[in-house]
Image (cartoon, rainbow, N blue to C red):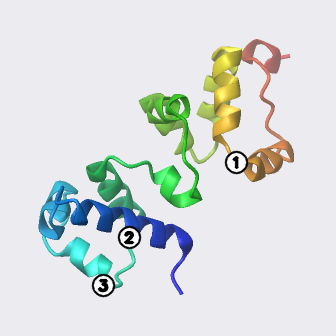
Amino acid sequence: MEDLWLVRFKEAVQKALDSGEFSMRALSLASGLNPNYVGDMMDGAQPTVKKFLAICDALGISPIEILYGEVLTQEVRELASRPEVIKLLRDPDGVEFVTYYSKVSEKDQKRIRDFLRPDDLEEAANDEVSLQPLSDQSK
């Protein structure tokens, strides 16, 4: 049985194919992949993270919506698409994220908290990392 995210992903791809927006070959090429990739994936090949993200980008769909099955508000989409936020979310140590988070407005901090899933926040609450402003961390 396929994971739910993969089912949602294939449904999004199929919707684009059915609408005539793309052929399998055109979507593969628009994603920077070999011409047969989307066809192979639709037939059962498991996409890598890089290929999943490339296809989402070509389709103009949110990987987060596919992975979590939740529709994001426009405000959260805009926040999540900022290059600095994308970079921070890929930071394995979270140091850049803490730095960025401490510098943004309270409104943006709330958006970030809303963007993260409750499970992520609970896990973060158990971590040793402090989300206090940088000026307070040096004390």
Residue 104 visible in the snapshot: yes
Residue sitting at x 67%, y 18%? 107
- Mark 3 is surrounded, within 10 Å at the Cα level, by few (under 14), some (14 to 19) or many (20 or more) other residues, namely few
Q: Secondary structure at mark 3?
A: loop
Q: Using residue 131 as the reference point, say whether residue 18 is left or right of it.
A: left
Q: Using residue 2 as the reference point, say whether residue 42 is left or right of it.
A: left
First in sequence: mark 3 vs mark 2: 2
Give whichever of 139, 64 is nearer the camera: 64
Q: Using residue 74 as the reference point, say whether residue 114 is left or right of it.
A: right
Give whichever of 139, 49 is nearer the camera: 49
**Rendered location of residue 5, percent (x, y):** 52, 67
**Rendered location of residue 36, percent (x, y):** 16, 75
Q: Which residue is mark 1?
A: 117
Give the amino acid at mark 3.
Asp
Tell me where residue 45 sits by quadrant.
Answer: bottom left
Residue reaching furthest front?
A: 19
Q: Secondary structure at mark 1?
A: loop
Quadrant of the snapshot with the C terminus: top right
Answer whether labels 1 and 3 touch (C-beta < 8 Å).
Answer: no
For residue 10, the mark is 2
Task: Measure the C-alpha gap from mark 1 to mark 2.
Answer: 23 Å
Residue sitting at x 49%, y 58%? 66
Give the amino acid at mark 1.
Arg
Task: Measure the C-alpha gap from mark 1 to mark 3.
Answer: 31 Å
Give the amino acid at mark 2.
Lys
Task: Measure the C-alpha gap from mark 3 to mark 2.
Answer: 10 Å
Q: Secondary structure at mark 2?
A: helix
First in sequence: mark 1 vs mark 3: 3
First in sequence: mark 1 vs mark 2: 2
